[in-house]
Amino acid sequence: MRLALKPALSRSWRDSDTLQFGTIPQHAGVLGNAAADALREFLGLVDGTRDRPALLAEGERIGFGSDPADSLLDLLEEAGVLDDAEAADQALARFPQPHRDLLGPDLASLSLIHAPPGAAPAVLARRPEHAVEVRGAGRIGAAVAAVLAAGGIGTVTVADSGRVTPADCSPAGLPAVDVGRLRATAAREAVDRATARRPGRRDRRPRPGLPDLVVLAPRDGSGAFAGGTPQARELLRAGVPHLYVGVVEEYGVVGPLVLPGVSACGHCLVLAREDEDAAWPRILAQLAEGGSGRAPTPACDTALATAVAGLAALHVQVFLDGGRPPSVDGWCELSAVDGMPRRLRLKGHPDCGCLWQPTPPH
């Protein structure tokens, strides 16, 4: 383990004797009595080129002392200031060039979320093993796929048919020059661009079997209320986690993220809406694919779609990295009216049965 001060943390002097690492209070670490020349010199040696024994020897050599150096390293580790540069190099080596050059800020961010030395590189090193399928290559789906690939998810596929229309285009997903091309091809190239991969090149074979997660992002925004669809029921039966994403009129929706057999599903949301509005099933049927009630031009503000795509990708990353995003047993709404996000809770509906039906592991 080659110890290094986390590069994501700024270093500021609170006064002539007190050094602060980081700016945000929950990450900031404060080191007192830091004005001594030997201590400052020792901190400069914690640069990722030496393991702990070598650092202790250097502390003795420069007159700081091995025991004070050992205590200081313990203090820095407790404050969440240290990371393992060797583990970071090994994690980045799992990605092909030039993608690994793009991941420095991602790894720096992970080092603040996963504090112990080596914890953040371990999280990043697992991302290439994950597979995500995005269903829908519109303004949201293509952007979600590109962001996930850029963040290190190893296999990101996009399922869609037909050709790109102007309504599918977004600065974060499919560019306007792709209008008229096959959506599946354009989306695949968007994923390639996000990882600096040459279009059409494959550095690894697609992982066989079911994906770790499916993002449901239909181009018309119906992913926000697709809980009763055949593909949703199929994913539940297969035990595949899935996330609903869409823009419905002036609202962006992320969630629920369904963990089959563990959390409330999309059909629970449909049933809860039906409890409040008896006409909802009839309306929903008219909004289904090919239904007569669909809007001639579905609303999908570019800024809102981009924000929703980013939030959805972040929730997927949190989940795959071992966390529990707020879209589990709930969903997040983002309003285009005032930009205000909010989280709404979702309980398993007693008439659904998704939480008691046995689900096979995927």
Image (spheres, rainbow, N blue to C red):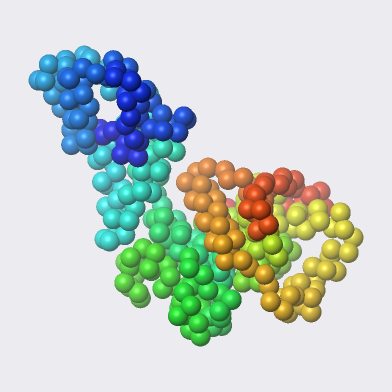
Q: Which quarter of the image is occupied by the C terminus? A: bottom right
The residue sitting at 71% across, 47% down in the picture is 344
Q: Tell me if 108 is positioned left or right of 220 in this view.
A: left
- Furthest residue toward bottom: 180
Q: Quadrant of residue 2?
A: top left
Q: Is residue 250 above or below residue 180?
A: above
- Seen from the viewer's position, the closer of residues 115 and 261 is 115
x and y percent of residue 258 in the render?
A: 64, 53
x and y percent of residue 197 in the render?
A: 33, 68
The residue sitting at 79% across, 68% down in the picture is 284
Decide if residue 360 is in sight here: no
Q: Quadrant of residue 114?
A: top left
The residue sitting at 56% across, 71% down in the picture is 138
- Furthest residue toward left: 61
- Seen from the viewer's position, the closer of residues 264 and 249 is 249
Q: Is residue 263 above or below residue 267?
A: above
Q: Quadrant of residue 155?
A: bottom left
Q: Tell me if 134 is positioned left or right of 355 in this view.
A: left
- Furthest residue toward right: 278
x and y percent of residue 131 in the render?
A: 46, 59
- Seen from the viewer's position, the closer of residues 16 and 108 is 16
